[in-house]
Image (cartoon, rainbow, N blue to C red):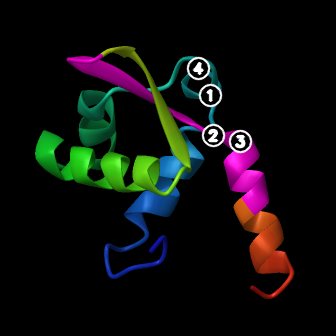
Amino acid sequence: MIRTPDGGTRLHILAWLREPGHAEHGATAEAVADRFGMTRPVALTHLRLLTAVGLLRTGGAAERPYYRRDEVRIAEVARMFEKGW
């Protein structure tokens, strides 16, 4: 799911959300769209997919959510893959 034919966009989004500022506060779909040169609907598709699998969580207002990494879940997934799952 993370390494799909999307050119690694989801991995890039996860890495970008780890940077200072975004790690603490998160980013909106608009900010992701601007940063990665995509439309807001495409950014939302990536963000919703990452949220659905538990790698991101949302906060803020429902009409303008901020997406942040879920570091605990990311660590859990990393451990599963390290064990050869």
Q: Would you say the residues marked 2 and 1 are in contact, meaning their CB atoms lie under 8 Å apart?
A: no
Q: From where the camera sits, is residue 84 visible?
A: yes
Residue at screen point 58% across, 49% down: 15
* Whether residue 59 is situated above or below residue 12 in the rendered picture: above
* Whether residue 53 is situated above or below residue 21 in the rendered picture: below
- Per the model, the C-alpha gap separating discs 3 and 1 is 10 Å
The N terminus: image quadrant: bottom left
- Upstream in sequence: badge 4 or badge 3: 4
Q: Amino acid at mark 2?
A: Asp
- According to the image, label 4 marks what residue? 21
* Stretch of the chain drawn in magenta: 62-76
Q: Amino acid at mark 3?
A: Glu
* Whether residue 10 is situated above or below residue 32 in the rendered picture: below
Q: Is residue 9 magenta?
A: no
Q: Would you say the residues marked 2 and 3 are in contact, meaning their CB atoms lie under 8 Å apart?
A: yes
Residue at screen point 54% across, 38% down: 17
- Per the model, the C-alpha gap separating discs 1 and 4 is 5 Å
- According to the image, label 1 marks what residue? 23
Q: Amino acid at mark 4?
A: Gly
For this view, does 12 lie left or right of residue 23?
Answer: left
- According to the image, label 3 marks what residue? 71
**Whole-percent x, y for residue 64 in the image:** 25, 18
Q: Secondary structure at mark 2?
A: loop
Q: Secondary structure at mark 4?
A: loop
Of tags 3 and 1, the one toward the viewer is 3
Q: Amino acid at mark 1?
A: Ala
Number of residues whose C-alpha sits closer than 10 Å to that of mark 2, classed few (under 14), some (14–19) or many (20 or more)? some
- According to the image, label 2 marks what residue? 70
